[in-house]
Amino acid sequence: MSLSVKEKTVVNWVLRALKLLICIFVVVASISSRLFAVVKFESIIHEFDPWFNFRATKLLTETSFYNFLNWFDSRTWYPLGRVTGGTLYPGLMTTASLIWNILHKIGIPIDIRNVCVLFAPIFSSLTAWATYKLASDIKDTRTGLLAAAFIAIVPGYISRSVAGSYDNEAIAITLLMLTFMFWIKSIKTGSILHTIGASLCYFYMVSAWGGYVFITNLIPFHVFCLLLMGRYSNQIYVSYTTWFVLGTVASMQIPFVGFLPIRSNDHMSALGIFGLLQIVAFGNFIKKSYSQNNNNSNSNGNLKKVMVFSFLAVCILGILLLILATYLGLIAPWTGRFYSLWDTNYAKIHIPIIASVSEHQPVAWPAFFFDTHFLIWLFPVGVTLLFSELKNEHVFIIVYSVLCSYFAGVMVRLMLTLTPVICIASSVALSQLFDTYLNFYDLFKFWQNGSSSRQNSTNKDTKLNFFKFLSKLIVSGSFIFYLYIFVYHCTWVTQNAYSSPSVVLPSQTPDGKMALIDDFREAYYWLRMNTDEDSKVAAWWDYGYQIGGMADRTTLVDNNTWNNTHIALVGKAMASNEDRAYEIFNELDVDYVLVVFGGLLGFGGDDLNKFLWMIRISEGIWPDEVNERSFFSTTGEYRVDSSATQVMKDSIMYKMSYHNFPYLYGENSGGVDHVRQQLIKPEDVGDLKRFHEVFTSENWMIRIYKLNERDNEGRDSEFSVFKNKSVANDNNSNVEGVDGSRRRRRRRRQQYSLLDASELRI
Amino acid sequence: MAANTSSANFIKTSTNATNKKSNSIWNDFQDVYRVSMKSYWDALDKYPKLKLIDIFCLFLVIIGVIQFAFLCLIRDNFPFNAFLSGFIICVGQFALLISFRMQYLNPFPGIPKNRAFGEFIVASLILHFICLHFIN
């Protein structure tokens, strides 16, 4: 059955229109599934890091780009300050403020917050497009469409790109896919233009995320594999050298990266492959010109000998140079983060601050299924299928998947870079399957011919056809069913697990209605409204960005953990007794101390649970002042009730968390800590003498204390006559009095039961 | 005693062999060098524009070496970015030129010579722009 030319063009147009339609649907799906966060909660910036990005973006829109790059932030890391402009990746903020400026120029007066909130969904649709192009280059456009649909809704990627999650990763994954798309294209064609695209995207990526090192190592590794497989071609030379030269010199323009690309060992593989490629190209050139003039087989053997000899010489020379450079200090030593990639225990032993971040923990196995659903078992199939053809671009996907599977097993956050390749590989597998089993062309032909040729065909023939049809139907039907379940799973996960802003906590009233626990914003708003503009707030580093963004107060430490000692100092203050802590806080000019306490609600991510990390980090710096063992009970348990050690009970973290807590349920019964399921008795909690409570949020999640002031003669606060006066001043927002508020809180406590808030910060 | 002498003999012969071998490798090198130089001059005669490209290549190498030698001479790399951009522009332009040279001799499928030249120009312009920005 042959089609005429006209029919063919019609079919082509229909196919093209269908493709466009599917692409539009994918884009709509990718954006709308990320809007759950806005629909369920509100248009709010999520979590921790996004608050800093938001603050920086706001500054960028208010001042100039020049000021932004030279930004010295004196309101964080007090009293040190932070050279923020030189230590951030500006890509995200620059893009957001560019969008904001353009929208304002064309007369849409949108708020910068809304731009930031909707930033990730918009860029995820771009990711889908780039993945479509990339997967189309790997196999065909059907694969591309499947891959785009997968990446649009797969939870592993949504986890970092819901509306409001205004983080570097939101734009970085888009750029990752764009870079890889251009790279595959340039490897295929050898066109310098495509390589320029790859290196510009790489530059953009460097400006946006520290994970660019992944590209810096993956592309050279790909080239290296191709060289080892004996697949050197001029196309590879052209695309790699152009990418390397342009990409490297461009990446050095980012102030935070600076000279790293030629100094740190993370980047050395790229440089090494560049050198190797020059040598191989030269060898290739010699070989070609030699064999052009010489057809003698013996002399070809000579050539081989020469090649091997010079190759060995070059290798030895290169290794010697590398050792010499490291020895002389020209190349930076391997960084800790790098070691923790290879040895999962490295960070735990050497750098507690890296180990303490939950993102840096190894992935739990169920997380793979939770984040990618049935793609995780299609993924190996797809990789195996790629082996059967093994073109250059297939090698890339294989290398990518092998490397990333390992790294994702080491660090949770690298799951994010694994997800795209899972989508691509499994779409290869699925489209291969559909090519075979969803092809009912034979059946149509049979039907069409059936009326005319039924009398000719034997009975056996139709039977065979029927079974063939049945097997096709079963296989494709079951996979379509899996796809349906996949969509269902993705929607469910997005809705329930990844849309929570973690600034506002979801919970339920007993009758099943949704209720929001808004203690964080309540407390930060209180700080903003009731404290002096220049007051300094001491809190654990997790809350630094939020205090800076929402309360606009000076913080000691924040989520940019650039100074371990300073963090350890805050940890030491929290772990030491009242007198010592008062001394430390006074030295740091602290006015308020903020602690997060989840015991009343059952919020697992509170400061008492993070307390061990504070102790460990400060023990790393002052081993003789802080001792982790002394915080454990005699049986070696982490207890907070009567069997807790005296050191634990004396620490201000303990006192501040449980201050007045045992009296909440009546005079002498004591209070049950719902996180640790232990009974806190009134006699366990010592009185605070040098701090006084100024604010406690509705569900007791945030408690803020003020340091008692020294009197005019600098005498200690304990004897200060001004103590009561300042309490009266600060407490005027809680005028109801302690008894009234206590009763009110008890009532609320009965109404809410918190939904797994402990899992919110996976 | 006998065993000793035989081993000494063995050592002697093996050193002789390595001598001979290195000699032959040297010969091989000379041979390869001669032949490839010949084919190189042939290519130059065939495509006169190659001369231009290769002179430019040589020029870049010389400039790069001079910069590096100067760095070693004054034993300081103070405006490091200036040195780097100067050096990288030589290396980068060299790599781009070689890329273009390859495409000039045997064009890739789908990319005619003229387009290759245009792409080369665009890449060079971008390289120069970035390096100028970097040099301050």
Image (cartoon, helix red, strand yellow):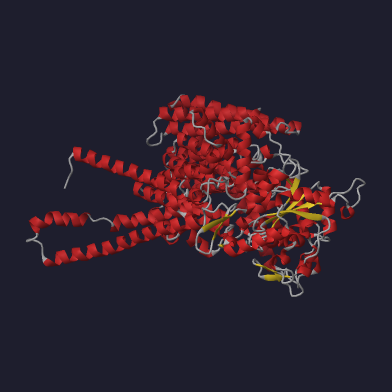
Q: For this rendering, which residue is in front, B37 or A135? A: A135
Which residue reaches farthest right?
Answer: A713
Q: How many marks?
A: 0
- Horizontal and vertical percent for residue A94? 57, 36
- Horizontal and vertical percent for residue A565? 77, 51
Q: For this rendering, which residue is in front, A101 or A617? A: A101
- Horizontal and vertical percent for residue A366? 51, 64
- The answer to whether residue B5 is left or right of residue A486 is right
Q: Residue A270: in sight, yes or no?
A: yes
- Horizontal and vertical percent for residue A604? 63, 62
Which residue reaches farthest left?
Answer: A455
Vertical position of residue A295 compared to residue A689: above or below: above
Which residue occupies 91% across, 48% down?
A: A714
Which residue occupies 67% across, 52% down?
A: A542
Q: For this rendering, which residue is in front, A27 or B6? A: A27
Vertical position of residue A703 compared to residue A265: above or below: below
- The answer to whether residue A513 is left or right of residue A663 is left
Q: Residue B9: in sight, yes or no?
A: no
Quadrant location of residue A641?
Answer: bottom right
- The answer to whether residue A331 is left or right of residue A573 is left
Q: Quadrant of the C terminus of chain A?
A: bottom right
- The answer to whether residue B122 is left or right of residue A672 is left
Which residue reaches farthest bottom?
Answer: A635
Q: For this rendering, which residue is in front, A42 or A122? A: A42
